[in-house]
Image: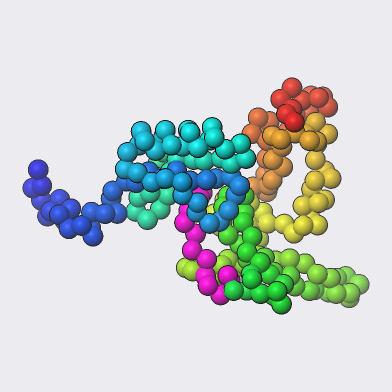
Amino acid sequence: MMDNTFDLQYLNESFAIPFNKTYLVIRTYPISWRLYVVADTICKTTAMSTCESSNLSHENSCFSLKVLQFGKLWNLDGALSQEQDWQVHHDYKIASRDLCTDGEIITCDCSYPLFSALSTQLNAYNEPTEYWYYMTCLEDDNGRHIETCPNCGKVLQDEEDENLENENQPIACVGCKNYHGETYNKVPLICAIYPSGYDKSTICPDWQD
């Protein structure tokens, strides 16, 4: 029963729509900033079934169930999803396709789009050296130079730094599909099973090919 002014607003469709829940089955791997929706429905049971069947029928892809509400994607536990319907500014799309521009749109591990561009600076010996830097490129947030991902907090590194980091990979983790090795807020995450790394021996009991 609608017995107050606020409740009566739900009779207005434009007011009520944001409060409605829609369940989306989206592809979360391979990682992309573009939202890849497999199915959308208002029935949670149907969405869960679709998500399960999608994961079973695709060997090289992963799918997840999200809730669309208030214009955002949410996890089933109510937390804000790292995957969103990112709207990249048109100028950065053009620049990314321009072969004369040393820059491109890349995707963070959390799905957030970043514009990576090449620049030059002088080193300690006054010699020019190239380096990659990162900028925000969304319609509502662009042009900011950043060192960490605004969405997940991951420290952004250029390719040379990443190669150096791979050289420092723990022996027990070499070749293991569980290895993560990324740094979040200056704290390295080796893998989900052993966040700080497995250091009891060089043979990890959870190593997987």
In the displayed structure image, the side of residue 68 where residue 29 appears, left or right: right
Which quadrant holds residue 101? Answer: bottom right
Q: How many marks?
A: 0
In the displayed structure image, the side of residue 130 where residue 87 appears, left or right: left
| Residue 53 image position (x, y, % from top left) | 48, 33
Identify which residue, 58 or 111, lies in the foreground: 58
Q: Which residues are magenta?
A: 79-93
Q: Which quadrant of the rendered structure holds the N terminus?
A: top left
Q: Which quadrant of the rendered structure holds the C terminus?
A: top right
Q: Residue at x 62, y 54 (%)?
A: 108
| Residue 133 image position (x, y, % from top left) | 70, 66
Is residue 36 visible to the viewer in this orientation of the structure?
yes
Q: Residue at x 55, y 45 (%)?
A: 28
Which quadrant holds residue 167? Answer: top right
| Residue 106 image position (x, y, % from top left) | 64, 60
Q: Residue furthest top?
A: 205
Q: Residue furthest right?
A: 125
| Residue 74 image position (x, y, % from top left) | 42, 46
> Quick check: is 86 in the magenta stretch?
yes
Q: Residue at x 62, y 40 (%)?
A: 60
